[in-house]
Image: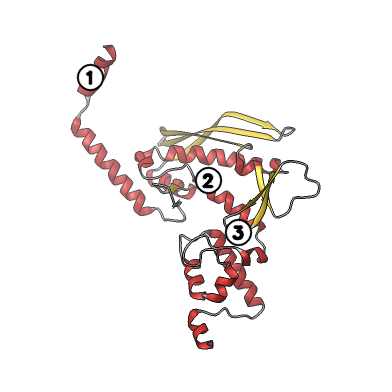
Amino acid sequence: MSNEINALSIIETVEIDNIANTMAKIQQMQNVVQKTLKKGHDFGEVPGTSKPTLLKPGGEKICMLFGLNPEYEFLQTTEDYDKEFFSYNIRCTLFRNGQPVAQGVGSCNSKEKKYRYINVDNIPDSYIGQSEKITDKYGRVRYKINNPDICSLVNTILKMAKKRAFIDAVLQVASLSEVFTQDIEDMGDFMQQEQDATLTIEQAKNLKLSFGKYKGTTLIDLVHKDGNYCDWLYNNDKTDPIIKKALNMILEDANKQSLQFPTEENTEKQE
């Protein structure tokens, strides 16, 4: 009964007009944020998700718009170099004119799959751990093994924990969690870095498309078959960054050999 009385007491003290004005301002702020942020830089879109994911540059821009300054504190830290386990739990508080506005928490540890494992083209002779043979979405046969150098990722893991806490705090400003999510905001960057670091020209040529009318076609075959489609892929904002990188590598390799890839128009002329 006391809970009901307390709830009613709160409702009775609320000014409905003030609430309506506040809700309208929140909507206006959300509109300003959406119009100001740039897709692909400040926020990203991943197929299968209902909302775009807010990226760190977008969070920083929102803080500039609202005059917010982030401060961080460690809630829990584990750094065990012998066992190669690192874990950080961080709280981020956003301040405006010295007053706290929003708080967020974020954690990251070396047992997360993106740090614990790496994909390699061949299993090293000295490797004695478990391995798994996989075929990635580009048609490459690779092997998933334990990361042999997790200690070199300590700073990356720390920064990821800070970024997660920061984004969590930013999403509370003007109820921006209605507009953006952070659930997948860090996955694309890591996967792209991993793929970029190991991509050779031969692998680039043999990457296969997993969508569209040329699904299952290798990039080198596509380049010789339909250069216009390659141009469209390269200039499309939604194209996988790895596909773009591979196309660029193929083009650079062709330029070195003074080759010209035919477009549909050129192909018709040759016929």
Residue 156 in view: no
Residue under label 3, please give it. 139
Q: Position of residue 254 (x, y in %)?
A: 63, 75
Q: Residue at x 55, y 38 (%)?
A: 161
Front tag of 3 and 1: 3
Residue, far left: 17
**Mark 3 closeness class: few <14, some 14–19, many ≥20 residues within 10 Å:** some
Q: Secondary structure at mark 3?
A: loop
Residue 248 sits above or below residue 84 on the image: below
Residue 201 sits above or below residue 30 on the image: below
Residue 154 sits above or below residue 263 on the image: above
Given the image, on which type of amino acid does mark 2 rest? Asp
Q: Nearer the viewer, residue 223 or 192?
A: 223
Q: Position of residue 136 (x, y in %)?
A: 60, 54
Residue 111 sits above or below residue 239 on the image: above
Q: Nearer the viewer, residue 27 or 211?
A: 211
- The disc, 3 or 1, on the residue closer to the chain's N-terminal end is 1
* Quarter of the image that includes the N terminus: top left
Residue under label 1, please give it. 8
